[in-house]
Image (tube, coloured by chain):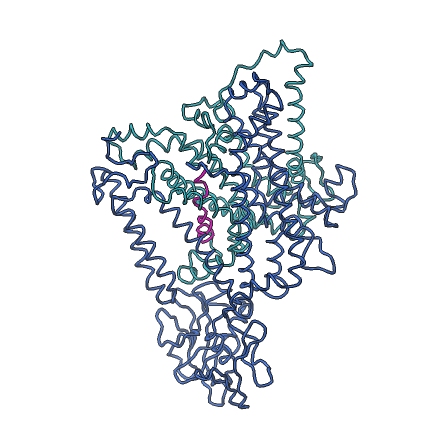
C-alpha cells in the first residue's frame, strides 16, 4: 500500500538474506556489549522488555496450554480439564480417529486448502504483476475497488451463493451444492485476495531487473516466470500461510455448503462434535484441534523469518 | 529506454497504451511451447462451453448459458491476440471475483425486492400446477402404474423422475417429470413389469422415498389428455383428473366438485388463491416482487427499530474496541521486542504468533468453554464466580477479551514489520534533536507507523463489524431476556438480522437479502469514511 520512505521491509530479502536472520532480512546491528552495562541500566533498557515479553507469552499461550491439556485428559470433559496437563493419555485421539470420520475431514480440508491456496496465489500474483508493472486505464480504480469488495464477507451473499450453486448443480452435478469442488470454486471467488500484499512486494523489486531481461530478449511471460516468481518466494510463503489458515478455519460457508457426512471439513466436523455436547466432548474436540493446528503451527514456525518483514511490505491483508 | 519499444510501456504514469504490438502472437516472441499451451487452453475453454450448452438449454438456465459463453469469449479475446497485456494477467482472478463475489452480491440485491422464502419458493405457474396437481382424484377407470422413483441428482433432494409401467401393459415404459411424460426412455432395465435400473439414475429405496415424501407429494406428471399421474404409495401410481381447474385468462381456480371459484388476493405481502370469504385454497404462495417492502420493514418495524439502535451502538463499540485493543496490545509487544539487544527475540516472536496459527473456529469454541461459570478456566484462574454469559455486560466483556486474544498476534506481526520499515537514522536524528524516548516515538515513529498500518486497521474494522463467526460461536448472540427473545445481549447487526430472517417466522430470504444489502451499505460507508479520515489511500502508486 503506502510505501514508507527508506527501503521497504522485504527488500533486503531480495538480496539473498542469510536464512538465519530473523525479522524478514532486517539488518542486525552489532549487539551492544552486554558486560559493560550496570544492572540498573540493563533493566531500564532491556530487562523490562523481557518482563513484558514473558507476560505476553503467558497471555498468548494459556489457551493453547489448556487445549493441549484437555486433549490429554482421559475424561475429556470441561469439569476435569485444567490448564497444566495432569495426566497423559491418548484416549481422546484414538477415540477421535476410531469413532469419527476424522481422516475424511482431514483429507477434505487438505484438498480444499491446497486448491484454494494454489489458485489464490497464482491469480493474485498475476494481477499484482499487472498492477505493479503496467500502467493502464482504471488501474487505481481497480485497486481501490478490490480493497472495498474484500471488506464484505462472502457470508453476506450466502443465500445468493446457495441458490446459484443449486442451479449450477442441476446442470453440472459435480460442482453443485454439497460437493467439495463446488465449495472450492466458491472459495476461489476471493482469488484476488492477496493482490495488495503481493503488489507491495513487487513494487520493491527494481524494474531494472525486468528491463535487463527484456533487453536479453525475454518475453513478458518469461520475465514473469523466470525472473520475478523466484524472487517472490517470501511473500508467497506468507500469503499462502494466511490463506491456508483462513480456509482451514472457514466454518460458516462450509456449514451451509457441505451437508453430507463424507464432505465435511475439519471445521464443520469438529464443530458438530463440540456442538453436540459442549462439556463432555471437549477432550475429543481438543484432540482434533491439536491435530488440525500442528501442521499450521509448524508451517508458521518454518516460515517465520519471512513473515514479519513481508506482511507489511504489501500493507494490506485481504 | 525510449528506443527499446519492444514490449513494456514505460512505467512513468502516463496512460498511453504502450508501444504498438503485432496483432497476433508470434511464435518467435513467446516460443512454440507457450503458444501450444495457449492453443490447448483456449481449446479446452471453448470445448467446455460447447459441451455444456445442450444441458443448459435443456434446463432452461439461460443466464448460465450466457455467462459461460461470455466467459469463453473474454478468455479468447484476451489470450488469442497479442494486445492488452495487463488484461492477460488480470482476467483470471477478475473472472472469479465477478462470478463468485460480485454476481452473488447483485443477486442478493435483486432478491431483496422479492418476498422469496418459505411458502413462496416457486413461481406462480409452478404453484398453480402444484395446487391443481394435488387435487388429482382417482376415478373408477383410473389406469394404475408400477412406479419406480429415480433421481439423477441427490436421493434426498432430487430432482426426481418417475419411471412408470402401466399395469395392463407391462412392456411399455414412460418417464415422467413435472414437465410432462415421455415414451420409451433409453437405458432402462425392465424386470417383471417394473423398472429396476436406469443408466445415469439412482433408484430410490423405500427408506429414501419416505424421507423425500414431501417433495414427491408435490409431483404430478401431466399427461396429454388433461389428467395427471400421481404416486400411490411407494411403488405404484395412478392417473386421474384434477378436481381443480385453472383458468388462465381469468386467473382463477375453479373447484369442479363444488363450483367454488378461487381468485388471487393479497394477504400480507403474499398473494393466495382465495374464495369469496377469503379462505385460502392452499397455503402455497409464489415469489412476487414486493418493491421496497423489505427495506420498509427494516426501517419501520417497531421491534427492529427499538433493537436496531442498541445493537448498532454495540456493533460499533465491538468493532472499534477490537481494532484499537488488538492494535495497542500488538504494538506494545512489538515495540518491546524490537530492540536487537533482547536475547531470544525469535523465540518470543514465534510464541506470540501461535494464536494466529490456530484456526479461528477452534479458538472461539475453546474460549466459549472458558467462560463456563462452574468449571470454566477464567473463573478457575481468577477465583471469581462470574456468570459470564448470564448477563449482557459480562458477556460483552467476555466477547471483547476473546477477540483481543484472537486479533493481537496479527497486529503484533504488522507492527513489527512496520517498525522495521522505519529507517534507523530517522530515530537517531530525532534523539540528537532531543526527541528521545517517548517523545520520539509519539512524534516520529508512531505517525510513520500509522501511515503503513492505517489501511490494515480499516480492513480489520470492517472484518470485525461483520464478524458473525465470533459472536455465533462464542455466545450465539445471547444472553436473551424473556421479554425480548430475538435480540441478545451480544448480538451484532449481522447475527441479529440473520436470526430474524431465518428464525421463528420461517425462512424469509427476501428479507434476509435486504438485510445483507443494508449491511453492505453500512460497512462500505464506514470504511470509506475511515479511509478518508486516515488519508491513507492518497498515494496509491
Number of labels in the image equals 0
Chain coloured blue in the rendered structure: B
**Relative image position of residue B62 (x, y in whole percent):** 37, 64
Instruction: Specify the farthest residue to the front.
Output: B433
Residue A84 at what x, y percent from top left? 70, 34
Residue B250: percent from left, percent from top: 46, 84
Q: Residue, x 71% and y 40% (percent of image)?
A: A81
Residue A174: quarter of image:
bottom left
Q: Is residue B182 above or below residue B105?
A: below
Q: Residue at x 46, y 31 (%)?
A: A3
Instruction: Confirm whether residue A60 shows in the render.
Output: yes
Residue A165 visible in this rendered orientation of the protein: no
- Secondary structure of the magenta portion, mostly? helix
Picture layout, residue B53 above or below residue B273 = above
Q: Image quarter for residue A282?
A: top right
Residue B223 occupies which quadrant of the picture? Answer: bottom left
Q: In the rendered image of this protein, does residue B304 appear above or below residue B234?
A: above
Camera-side residue: B519 or B189?
Answer: B519
- Magenta stretch: includes residue A201: no
Q: Is residue A184 magenta?
A: yes
Q: Image check: A78 left or right of A223? A: right
Magenta residue span: A181-196
Q: Nearer the viewer, residue A130 or B64?
A: A130
Chain A takes which shade in the image? cyan
Residue lying farthest to the top in this orientation = A36
Amino acid at each position: 500500500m503506502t510505501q514508507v520512505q527508506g527501503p521497504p521491509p522485504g527488500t533486503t530479502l531480495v538480496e539473498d538474506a542469510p536464512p538465519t536472520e530473523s525479522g524478514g532480512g532486517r539488518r542486525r546491528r552489532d549487539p551492544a556489549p552486554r558486560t559493560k552495562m550496570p544492572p540498573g541500566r540493563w533493566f531500564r533498557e532491556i530487562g523490562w522488555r523481557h518482563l513484558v515479553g514473558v507476560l505476553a507469552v503467558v497471555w498468548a499461550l494459556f489457551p493453547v496450554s489448556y487445549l493441549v491439556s484437555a486433549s490429554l485428559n482421559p475424561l475429556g470433559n470441561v469439569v476435569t480439564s485444567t490448564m497444566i496437563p495432569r495426566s497423559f493419555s491418548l484416549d481422546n485421539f484414538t477415540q477421535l480417529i476410531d469413532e469419527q470420520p476424522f481422516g475424511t475431514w482431514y483429507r477434505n480440508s487438505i484438498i480444499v486448502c491446497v486448491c484454494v491456496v494454489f489458485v489464490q496465489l497464482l491469480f493474485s500474483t498475476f494481477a499484482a504483476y499487472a498492477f505493479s508493472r503496467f500502467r493502464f486505464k482504471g488501474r487505481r480504480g481497480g485497486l481501490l475497488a478490490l480493497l472495498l469488495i474484500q471488506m464484505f464477507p462472502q457470508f453476506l451473499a450466502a443465500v445468493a451463493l446457495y441458490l446459484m450453486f443449486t442451479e449450477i448443480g442441476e446442470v453440472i452435478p459435480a460442482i453443485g451444492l454439497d460437493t467439495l469442488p463446488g465449495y472450492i470454486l466458491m472459495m476461489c471467488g476471493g482469488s484476488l485476495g492477496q493482490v495488495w500484499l503481493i503488489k507491495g512486494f513487487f513494487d520493491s523489486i527494481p524494474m531494472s531487473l525486468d528491463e535487463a531481461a527484456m533487453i536479453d530478449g525475454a518475453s513478458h511471460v518469461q520475465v514473469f516466470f523466470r525472473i520475478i516468481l523466484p524472487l517472490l518466494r517470501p511473500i508467497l510463503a506468507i500469503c499462502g500461510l494466511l490463506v491456508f489458515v483462513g480456509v482451514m478455519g472457514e466454518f460458516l460457508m462450509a456449514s451451509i455448503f457441505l451437508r453430507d457426512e463424507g464432505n465435511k471439513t475439519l471445521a464443520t466436523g469438529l464443530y458438530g462434535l463440540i456442538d453436540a455436547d459442549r462439556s463432555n466432548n471437549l477432550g475429543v474436540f481438543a484432540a482434533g484441534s491439536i491435530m488440525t493446528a500442528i501442521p499450521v503451527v509448524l508451517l508458521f514456525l518454518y516460515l517465520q523469518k519471512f513473515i514479519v518483514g513481508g506482511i507489511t511490505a504489501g500493507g494490506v491483508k485481504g | 529506454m525510449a528506443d527499446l519499444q519492444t514490449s513494456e510501456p514505460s512505467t512513468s504514469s502516463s496512460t498511453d497504451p504502450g508501444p504498438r504490438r503485432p496483432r497476433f502472437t508470434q511464435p518467435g516472441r513467446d516460443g512454440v511451447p507457450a503458444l501450444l499451451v495457449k492453443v490447448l487452453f483456449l481449446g479446452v475453454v471453448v470445448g467446455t462451453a460447447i459441451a455444456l450448452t445442450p444441458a443448459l438449454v435443456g434446463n432452461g438456465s439461460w443466464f448460465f448459458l450466457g455467462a459461460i459463453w461470455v466467459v469463453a469469449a473474454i478468455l479468447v479475446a484476451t489470450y488469442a491476440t497479442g494486445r492488452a497485456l495487463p488484461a492477460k494477467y488480470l482476467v483470471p482472478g477478475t473472472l472469479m471475483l465477478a462470478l463468485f463475489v460480485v454476481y452473488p452480491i447483485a443477486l442478493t440485491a435483486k432478491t431483496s425486492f422479492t418476498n422469496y422464502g418459505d411458502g413462496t419458493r416457486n413461481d406462480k405457474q409452478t404453484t398453480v400446477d402444484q395446487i391443481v396437481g394435488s387435487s388429482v382424484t382417482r376415478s373408477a377407470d383410473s389406469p394404475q402404474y408400477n412406479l419406480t422413483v429415480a433421481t439423477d441428482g441427490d436421493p434426498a433432494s432430487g430432482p426426481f423422475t418417475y419411471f412408470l409401467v402401466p399395469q395392463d401393459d407391462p412392456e411399455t415404459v414412460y418417464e415422467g417429470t413435472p414437465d410432462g411424460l415421455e415414451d420409451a426412455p433409453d437405458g432402462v432395465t425392465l424386470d417383471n413389469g417394473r423398472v429396476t435400473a436406469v443408466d445415469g439414475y439412482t433408484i430410490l429405496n423405500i427408506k429414501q422415498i419416505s424421507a423425500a415424501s414431501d417433495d414427491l407429494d408435490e409431483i404430478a406428471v401431466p399427461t396429454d389428455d388433461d389428467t395427471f399421474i400421481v404416486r400411490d404409495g411407494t411403488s405404484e401410481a395412478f392417473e386421474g383428473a384434477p378436481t381443480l381447474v385453472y383458468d388462465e385468462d381469468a386467473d382463477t381456480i375453479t373447484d369442479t366438485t363444488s363450483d367454488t371459484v378461487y381468485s388471487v388476493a393479497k394477504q400480507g405481502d403474499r398473494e393466495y388463491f382465495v374464495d369469496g370469504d377469503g379462505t385460502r385454497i392452499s397455503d402455497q404462495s409464489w415469489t412476487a416482487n414486493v418493491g421496497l417492502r423489505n427495506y420498509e420493514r427494516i426501517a419501520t418495524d417497531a421491534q427492529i427499530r427499538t433493537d436496531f439502535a442498541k445493537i448498532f451502538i454495540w456493533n460499533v463499540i465491538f468493532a472499534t474496541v477490537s481494532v484499537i485493543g488488538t492494535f495497542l496490545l500488538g504494538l506494545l509487544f512489538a515495540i518491546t521486542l524490537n530492540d536487537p539487544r533482547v536475547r531470544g527475540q525469535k523465540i518470543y516472536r514465534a510464541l506470540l504468533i501461535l494464536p494466529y496459527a490456530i484456526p479461528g473456529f477452534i479458538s472461539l469454541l475453546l474460549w466459549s468453554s472458558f467462560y463456563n461459570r462452574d468449571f470454566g478456566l477464567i473463573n478457575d484462574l481468577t477465583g471469581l464466580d462470574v456468570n459470564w454469559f448470564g448477563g449482557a455486560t459480562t458477556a460483552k466483556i467476555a466477547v471483547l477479551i476473546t477477540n483481543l486474544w484472537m486479533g493481537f498476534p496479527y497486529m503484533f506481526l504488522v507492527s513489527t514489520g512496520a517498525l522495521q520499515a522505519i529507517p534507523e537514522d530517522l530515530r537517531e536524528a530525532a534523539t540528537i534533536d532531543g526527541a528521545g524516548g517517548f517523545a520520539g516515538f509519539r512524534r516520529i515513529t508512531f505517525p510513520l507507523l500509522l501511515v503503513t498500518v492505517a489501511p490494515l486497521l480499516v480492513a480489520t474494522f470492517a472484518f470485525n463489524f461483520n464478524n458473525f463467526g465470533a459472536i455465533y460461536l462464542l455466545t450465539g448472540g445471547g444472553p436473551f431476556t424473556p421479554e425480548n427473545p430475538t435480540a441478545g445481549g451480544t448480538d451484532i447487526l449481522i447475527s441479529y438480522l440473520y436470526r430474524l430472517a431465518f428464525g421463528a417466522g420461517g425462512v424469509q430470504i427476501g428479507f434476509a437479502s435486504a438485510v445483507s444489502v443494508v449491511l453492505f451499505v453500512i460497512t462500505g460507508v464506514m470504511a470509506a469514511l475511515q479511509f478518508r479520515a486516515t488519508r491513507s489511500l492518497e498515494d496509491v502508486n
